[in-house]
Amino acid sequence: MKIQGIPYRTIWPDGGLVRVIDQARLPFELRVVELRSLRDAATAISRMTVRGAPLIGATAAYGVALALREDPGDGALGTAIETLLSTRPTAFNLAWSLERMRKRLAPLAPSRRAAAAWEEAAAICEEDVAHCRAIGAHGAALISRIADRAAGRAVNVLTHCNAGWLACVDWGTALAPIYHAHDAGLAVHVWVDETRPRNQGASLTAYELGAHGVPHTVIADNLGGHLMQRGQVDLVLVGSDRVTAGGDVCNKVGTYLKALAARDNRVPFYAALPFSTIDWSLSDGERIPIEERSPSELTHVSGALEDGRVVSVRVVPEASRALNLAFDVTPARLVSGIVTERGVCAASAEGLRALYPGCGAAA
Ligand code: MRU
């Protein structure tokens, strides 16, 4: 996608190192940083320089390539995979990507591994772009059907967190259908949940929608239910960090409450995600590991002063404890459908298996 007319991806290799957009600095500064080692890649994921399920997977793949450049032996390969796997627990794309790297690299002679690792990481990125583009086309059909009934007014889509191109390599998952619909000339307006505590909606989703010219309005996380009661939301469209074989959807904390409000108000609630997000080994969303992050993300808020300096300020009394669980799980029964690169299916074992025959013998 483009920023000020210049096409960007979130991650790309460059002469033996890897470049990524530093998302911790957005929306105040567009800065590209270099990853030169396994440690750089692991730190970028755990500190959320890069974030979003597909991008975490892509960065981990390049992390393996960076590690094998130093040492292509079995020990180094195992260490790289373990190190990267421990960076963040919830997004399944991380484990998926590392398993794909392991399967491709482990059988090779060490002398051939480094080159193969760069190739495979690039293939993972290209596949993610193709999958997200296809998700966009399938999801845009949903928006188009709503537009047919909207008698010329804009279709109002509510989204949570950032599931746009910044969360992937390009295009995005939940935002890809919005970009497709907008580019095709449909009038779309996006309600952007701010997404406390890290404000990925306010800082990243608003940034990328604005850069692409998509009309949007940032709202407090708690406003969505009220807007749905007033008929101001046509569709809720979110991404996912892990979907079970039974169709339970894990996403940024707060998503479940949006699904409850959507059900109560008969607003369709869809999750958009690529194959790499589906954990076929799990049938039950309660077994998804939920990341607990530092309470400081809750007790402090960062923002820009009038003079441009970005500072962090405390908003919670020093003596108060804070609990920062980063994700929640929306049960399949609250999900109207799942948009994948292969099409739209019911959020159920049968629905997912119909799109992915041979997968889904979940425990
Ligand atoms: O903690 P984050 O910013 O990595 O969480 C991201 C999300 O929850 C996204 O909604 C999710 O990864 C969707 S993927 C495009």
Image: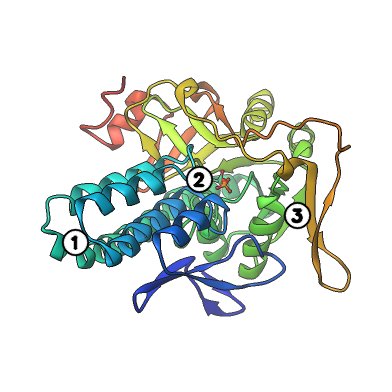
Asked where in the image residue 214 lies, by quadrant, the reply is bottom right
Amino acid type at image mark 2: Leu
Pick whichever, 270 or 241, lies toward us. 241
Q: Residues within 10 Å of mark 2 (few under 14, many from 20)?
A: some
Position above or below: 191 against 165: above
For image coordinates 54% across by 80% down, the residue present is: 6
Asked where in the image residue 246 lies, by quadrant, the reply is top left
Which is in the foreground here, disc 1 or disc 3? 1
For image coordinates 42% across by 30% down, the residue present is: 346
Circles 3, 2 touching at the beta carbon (< 8 Å): no
Asked where in the image residue 137 lies, by quadrant, the reply is bottom left
Pick whichever, 316 or 276, lies toward us. 316
**Residue 85 x %, y %:** 40, 43
For image coordinates 35% across by 79% down, the residue present is: 15
Viewport quadrant of the C terminus: top left
> Residue 217, which numbered label?
3
Q: How crowded is mark 3: few (under 14 residues within 10 Å), some or many (20 or more)?
A: some
Helix, strand or loop at mark 1: helix
Residue picked out by circle 1: 113
Helix, strand or loop at mark 3: strand
Q: Report whether 97 appears left or right of 176.
A: left
For image coordinates 33% across by 43% down, the residue present is: 96
| Image mark count | 3
Residue picked out by circle 2: 142
Q: Report whether 25 appears left or right of 288.
A: right
Residue 64 visible? The answer is yes
Circles 1, 3 touching at the beta carbon (< 8 Å): no
**Residue 340 x %, y %:** 39, 44
